[in-house]
């Protein structure tokens, strides 16, 4: 039993470390640019675009703009056959669809969490092995700004 507990704790620690690294990457202009380029090469750039759109949406103050931005996010990423449709489960998509007529600043939170998790667990580890990441590290080393890359 103790071995299983330690293994479980290890997974939680790995997930937390990965999340901190993804947060750091998304908060850095060069890091975000490299990650977007990588996701584009994998035909999954809609994930980071959706995540960024949600981050922008949550900062919206005007109720008119909330409705307009929510409709834009919905039509771009959520509705069936959207041009940048994200891969979320039926329950989450359906919940958003039922509530989009009266959007709140948290209406995309569940979908954003799912996409973030997908990026952190799936795309990010592959990004760390990519040429885009190697170029980013080289660029940062050339600038002597390596400290924002704690996951090296």
Image (cartoon, rainbow, N blue to C red):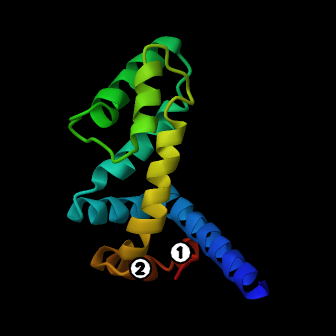
Picture residue at 36% right of the left edge, 81% below the top: 129
Q: Are marks 1 and 2 in contact (CB under 8 Å)?
A: yes
Identify the residue under disc 2: 137
Dot 2 falls on a residue whose secondary structure is: helix
Q: Which residue occupies the extreme bottom position in the image? A: 3
Picture residue at 70% right of the left edge, 82% below the top: 4
Dot 1, crowdedness within 10 Å: few (<14), some or many (≥20)? some
Q: Is residue 39 left or right of residue 152?
A: left
Q: Is residue 101 left or right of residue 147?
A: left
Residue 131 position, x and y percent, is 28, 79
Q: Quarter of the image holding residue 24?
A: bottom right
Q: Which residue occupies the extreme right position in the image? A: 2
Residue 10 position, x and y percent, is 67, 79
Residue 124 position, x and y percent, is 43, 68
Q: State which quarter of the image contains the N terminus.
A: bottom right
Picture residue at 34% right of the left edge, 48% below the top: 87
Q: Nearer the viewer, residue 5 or 26?
A: 5
Picture residue at 44% right of the left edge, 46% below the top: 51
Q: Is residue 130 left or right of residue 144?
A: left
Q: Is residue 68 above or below residue 12?
A: above
Identify the residue under disc 1: 149
Quote the CA–CA distance across marks 1 and 2: 8 Å
Q: Is residue 128 above or below residue 30?
A: below
């Amino acid at each position: 039993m103790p071995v299983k507990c330690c293994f479980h704790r290890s997974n939680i620690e790995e997930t937390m470390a990965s999340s901190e690294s993804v947060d750091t990457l998304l908060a850095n202009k060069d890091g975000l640019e490299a990650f977007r380029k990588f996701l584009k090469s994998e035909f999954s750039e809609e994930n980071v675009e959706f995540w960024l759109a949600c981050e922008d949406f949550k900062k919206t103050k005007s109720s008119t703009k909330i409705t307009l931005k929510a409709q834009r996010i919905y039509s771009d990423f959520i509705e069936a056959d959207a041009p940048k449709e994200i891969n979320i489960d039926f329950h989450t998509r359906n919940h958003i669809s039922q509530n989009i007529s009266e959007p709140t600043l948290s209406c995309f939170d569940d979908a954003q969490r799912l996409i973030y998790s997908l990026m952190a667990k799936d795309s990010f580890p592959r990004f760390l092995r990519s040429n885009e990441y190697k170029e980013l590290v080289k660029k940062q080393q050339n600038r002597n700004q390596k400290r924002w890359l704690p996951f090296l």
